[in-house]
Image (cartoon, rainbow, N blue to C red):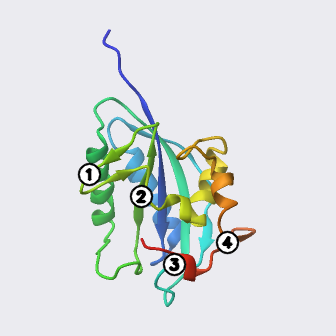
Amino acid sequence: MPHHTVTCGYLGLGSNMGDGPANLRLALDMLDALDGLTVDAVSPVFRTEPQGLADQDWFANCAARITLDARWAPEGLLDATSGIEAAMGRVRTVTWGPRVIDIDILLLDDAEWHSDRLQIPHPRMCERAFVLVPLMHLAPDIRIRGLRPSQWLARLEYSVDGDLIRQPSNIFRGE
């Protein structure tokens, strides 16, 4: 039997149009339906204040752990996540603006990937409490550029109150 490599990855999902938690569930179901991709675990859903463009609804955010078989390359995963965003009605008009769904590839094992379309690890994940807090629920001991999620969070100004994550927008440096 041929040896098949399995990759473990982490995705960040967000929505602030319509029913955010329902949009997250639909996107996760669509991901899990892809051949050779399994959604293994999902963090709790957090409500987070918008960053960058403040005048919009709060987001529902979560992180998901996925397993990919050998046929998945990073750019192919990006095509698949972009396809799900498009199928759910995502239109990219306003930077940092409202979105029915946003699916970010955060990590794929220890891989580093740099292309015009995709960077792994996600280049701004360590600045975002709305990414790190859910990720900490799934993988508290994972290393991102040498540090655990809790160690990155210790460098940020943020607060968690139940399912609410607040982070001042003035320190936010981009999407």
Return the disc, 3 or 1, that comes first in the chain's sequence: 3
Q: Please report the residue visible at 26 percent of the width from the left and 45 percent of the height from the top.
A: 76
| Numbered tag placed on residue 157 in the rendering | 4
| Amino acid type, label 3 | Gln
Of tags 1 and 2, which is closer to the observer? 1
| Residue marked by disc 2 | 104
| Amino acid type, label 4 | Glu
Q: Please report the residue visible at 28 percent of the width from the left and 63 percent of the height from the top.
A: 87
Return the disc, 1 or 2, that comes first in the chain's sequence: 2
| Residue marked by disc 3 | 51
Q: Secondary structure at mark 3?
A: loop
Task: Provide residue 172's location: percent of width, then percent of height.
Answer: 52, 75
Q: CA distance from mark 2 to mark 4?
A: 22 Å
Task: Provide residue 49's location: percent of width, then percent of height.
Answer: 58, 78
| Residue marked by disc 1 | 115
Q: Secondary structure at mark 1?
A: loop
Q: Secondary structure at mark 4?
A: loop
Tag 2 near tag 3, CB within 8 Å = no
The quadrant holding residue 73 is top left
Q: Please report the residue visible at 47 percent of the width from the left and 74 percent of the height from the top.
A: 173
Q: CA distance from mark 4 to mark 3?
A: 13 Å
| Amino acid type, label 2 | Asp
The quadrant holding residue 68 is top left
Quarter of the picture containing the N terminus is: top left
Q: Please report the residue visible at 57 percent of the width from the left and 43 percent of the height from the top.
A: 146
Whether residue 90 is situated above or below residue 113 in the rendered picture? below
